[in-house]
Image: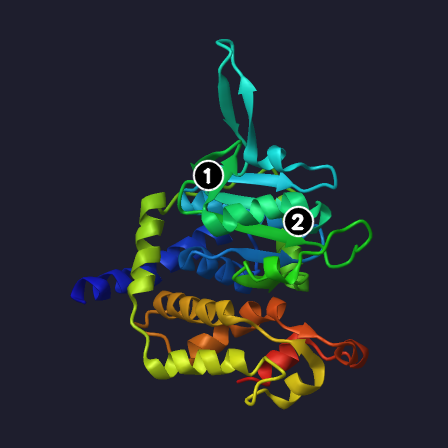
Amino acid sequence: MRVLGREVRSLPKKHKALKQEIAKVIVGQEDVINQILISIFSGGHSLLIGVPGLAKTLMVNTIAQALGLDFKRIQFTPDLMPSDILGSEILDEDRRFKFIKGPIFANIILADEINRTPPKTQAALLEAMQERAVTVAGHNYKLELPYFVLATQNPIEQEGTYPLPEAQLDRFMFAINLEYPSFQEEVDVVKATTTDLKVSVNSLFSPQEIIDFQNVIRRIPVADNVIEYAVAMVSKTRPNSDTAANLVKEYVDWGAGPRASQNLILAAKTHAATNGKFSPDAEDVQAVATSILRHRIIKNYKAEAEGVTDEAVIKSLF
């Protein structure tokens, strides 16, 4: 227990240094970076919803550099095939089959515009996310750990897209909304990016250190009342349950499943640890609830017509 305490104590310091390193390149977007880091340290994946040009690729690349991880970007298009991301077998000069690894074999994957590719290719990525392994031509290949997928979606264009089914959305720990920068942030971005100044990002972690931190976070104890609070919050999102909130009964068709409860507790542990606490409380659960529940609640037509937001529904659960 004493060893665990020492390891948890070192997390806030490392986390602060990591954010300072990322801030050399990325201006603002603190909430988004916080949630991506919570997701990585919890061992989950994230879905980033935002319009083009908000530095999603640069952000993930910078985070990968600061964490000392290998980074690959896959641009999803309607003609992308599963073999394009997983890899394929070729005949080498000795007439033997040789497996050439695809871009999915990295620590951090940016799946850009995941809703532009057909379900067959989406499913190939989602198998890798869930199993941390891929199967090609009957052979199973393990992916290097830590493994983190950040998928992006553009909320504006819906023509020619293949929306992710609910079962696949559920695999993402967080759905993070990316907003436009404030006036001052945009001024700072323009100042920083229109000169010839090059900024170098230092690696503060090794892959093994991140795996160790993920294991430390899983060992953090959680009081029963906090677990019950998280499970009660998730059960309130289900319109047919006895405990459903009034807003849920009126505006929600389907609520969140048990995976949401697991993710709430894991993310609350990470949120507590990075803020110097030894065990999460209800406040930590609330801090991560919006992004964990946002994509798991399916609103009805009435909610769309009356402009009831996901955030309003989730706030009514607290």
Give how far apart the Cα atoms at labels 2 and 1 are.
Answer: 20 Å
Above or below, 273 relative to 132: below
Q: Amino acid at mark 2?
A: Ile
The residue shown at (29%, 60%) is 216
Quarter occupied by residue 156: bottom right
| 143 relative position to 304: left or right | left
Which residue in the structure is indicated by mark 1?
70
For residue 192, say whether it is visible: no
Residue most extreme to the top: 94
Q: Element under label 1?
A: loop
Which residue in the structure is indicated by mark 2?
114
Q: Element under label 2?
A: helix
Identify the image quadrant of the N terminus. bottom left
Q: Amino acid at mark 1?
A: Asp
Q: Which mark is residue 195?
A: none
| Depth order, front residue of 86/285 | 86
